[in-house]
Image: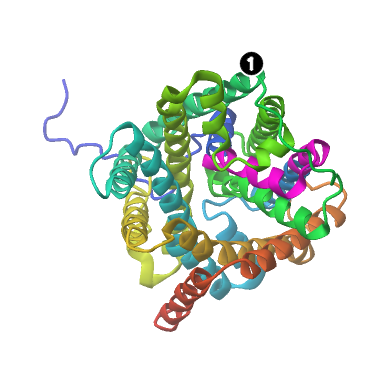
Amino acid sequence: MSDVNATPKITPITNEPAHSLRTIDITSLIVGTILGAGIFKVPSLVAGQLHSEPMILIAWLLGGLISLVGALCYVELATSFPNVGGEYFFLQKAYGKKIAFLYGWARSVIIVTGSIALLGITLGDYMSKIWPLGLYSSTVWAMLVVIGLSLLNCLGIKEGKTAQNILTIFEVGGVIAIIATGFMADSAPSIVQVTQTTPELGALSLAMVFVLLTYGGWNEAAYISAEAIDQKRGILKGLVLGLGLVTILYVLVNLSYFHAFGAQGMGQSNALASDLFELAYGHGSAVIFSAIVVFSCLNSINATIIFGSRSSFALGKDWKILSWIAEWHDSGTPRKAILLQCVISLLLIFGAAFVRQGFESIVEFTAPVFWFFIMLVGLSLFILRKRYPNTHRPFSIPMYPILPLIFTMTSGWLLWSSLAYSGIGALVGVGFLGLGAIALLFEKK
């Protein structure tokens, strides 16, 4: 008979993430983050620069290869120093806490929230074609989705990763539908052929900027390194499988476009996937295409919410001024970090509604800051190898130091490109980074 006066057993609430993500979950998150709405727009921009089908395919394959090199750098860092803070933690060990704080600030206020806002606006544009909600329909849809997915992830990591796996299936299925449509569609009427087959260096560089932006998101795996069940190889397998699948899908999408339009026709289209569905199924197919884009954006937003909140949590653990977001709820999620991320993203979406080129301005707002810190992460691999030579490295990047050097130089090139092609939005992003420096002055160690 139990003692009614006995002290009840209390299960303590942990303030640390658990090993709960399988390789398939990591792969799903990687695919969901990379395979965003860019694949529906970027192929026409790349074709408009290169004109040649072989060169277009080389550009997409090269983009996958460069991304894989960067991923291997991150795998070494993530397996040698597994931490929920990801890049924030690597930068802290390499450069000290002040640089790490600035990156954590930039990621929480600029980079992740900007990505969520961009995806939300894209979703809102296409959802409005299915179900319009008035004058500011796109903004309303974007805000509703960001709020809904943020609340879903507040329920727990189980709910978040389950939604991610389901959405990834729908998204990959949508891209496969585009591939099948392209190969089955009758070829569009031929247009005047352009004799140029070897693009100029400037055109090739610009095309690669577009391609590499479309591959963006693989670096997010660093933020779940501490949650992987397989601590030795989970991140490696997830990144390789995820990038491999995305590269195959990107190449097949372009091959299907070649069949339907040819390289020249691709370059002349402003909405390539939409034109493809119209060619194959008629004008009524716009709703089908819009639904595909909506599912793609839902998937990417959900993955970005999961990844982004982890870095904010890590930032709050180390700095008193943001300590209130360093709470890992017993549901398995950093709830306060998710809610902070949601609020900032909503402010960006709301502000973009009143700017003439809102979408482009948010791109300019995020890109230079993002590539600056990614370049620093690449350099940190060299610093940490020298500083911690005896650290156990479950995975060491092959062909060191050549591959890390390629990755770092590529990141520097993208930093320069994002500044060269940006406008006032880039200055605003740098200004927000400056606010982080001011916040650092008020921090009491």
Residue 328: x %, y % from top left: 37, 49
Residue 410 falls left or right of residue 100: right
Is residue 60 in the magenta section? yes
Q: In this rendered view, identify the residue nearer to me: 363 or 10.
A: 363
Q: Image quarter for residue 41?
A: top right
> Principal SS element in the magenta part?
helix
Is residue 32 in the magenta section? no
Colour mode of the rendering: rainbow
Q: Is residue 423 above or below residue 223?
A: below
- Find the magenta span and give its range: 33-61
Residue 332: x %, y % from top left: 38, 41
Residue 19 falls left or right of residue 371: left
Residue 276 falls left or right of residue 400: left
Question: Looking at the image, which residue sits at the far top?
Answer: 184
**Mark 1 surroundings: few (<14), some (14-19) or many (≥20) residues within 10 A:** few
Location of the C terminus by quadrant is bottom left
Residue 27: x %, y % from top left: 59, 33
Q: Is residue 248 above or below residue 356?
A: above
Disc 1 marks a residue whose amino acid type is Met
Q: Which residue is mark 1?
A: 184
Residue 154: x %, y % from top left: 32, 42
Q: In this rendered view, identify the residue nearer to me: 194 or 289.
A: 194
